[in-house]
Amino acid sequence: MFQRILIVCSGNICRSPFAQAMMMKIMPTIQVQSAGTVTALSELEGHHADPRMNEAAQLYNVDLKQHQARQLTPELCAWSDAILVMEHTHLSALLKIDASARGKSFILGQWGEGSIEDPYAKEQHHFVSAAKQIESACQSWRRKIQPKD
């Protein structure tokens, strides 16, 4: 089904790095990358994941210390079989970057969690909550992509 998944959030320092790492952990045969819709605008390219997100990720035995943020590009969109975004505003931003990605773009939490709120600049419990929602959504995608596992 899907062999190359791109996961998108706003800055690529909180939600999408964790979702990328979680997908890679639970589906090791799938290639996964992540990017942000406003990474360049926010001058976040090359930044590491937010330390609070890394702390929340540790609860799932996931390490984000090597992550470096990058901007969503048409090339990344073309690389992917599926693009998973955190919220509806990311769909709009994604389609401005690559309108041809419409048919392969989905909300990460579409099977239960819905949009996953950005924890950036909030207290730690928001990062833990976002990580819990993302982990659940990733497991839902795993069941759809690899139903026999």
Image: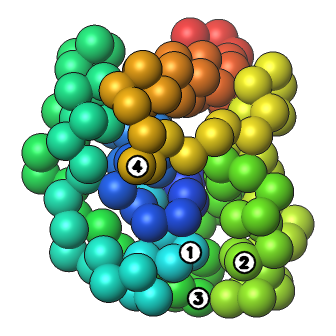
Q: Quarter-wise, where is residue 88 in the image?
A: bottom right
Badge 4 is on which residue? 121
User: Between tags 2 and 3, which lies in front?
Assistant: 2
Q: Amino acid at mark 3?
A: Pro
Q: Contact, CB < 8 Å: mark 2 with mark 1? A: yes
Secondary structure beneath dot 4 equals loop
In the rendered view of the protein, which quadrant contains the N terminus?
top right
Q: Amino acid at mark 2?
A: Ala
Q: Which mark is residue 37?
A: 1
Q: Contact, CB < 8 Å: mark 4 with mark 2? A: no
User: Between tags 4 and 2, which lies in front?
Assistant: 4
Q: Amino acid at mark 1?
A: Thr
Q: Say above or below: 87 vs 141.
A: below
User: Between tags 1 and 3, which lies in front?
Assistant: 1
Badge 2 is on which residue? 93
Circle nearer the N terminus (4, 1) = 1
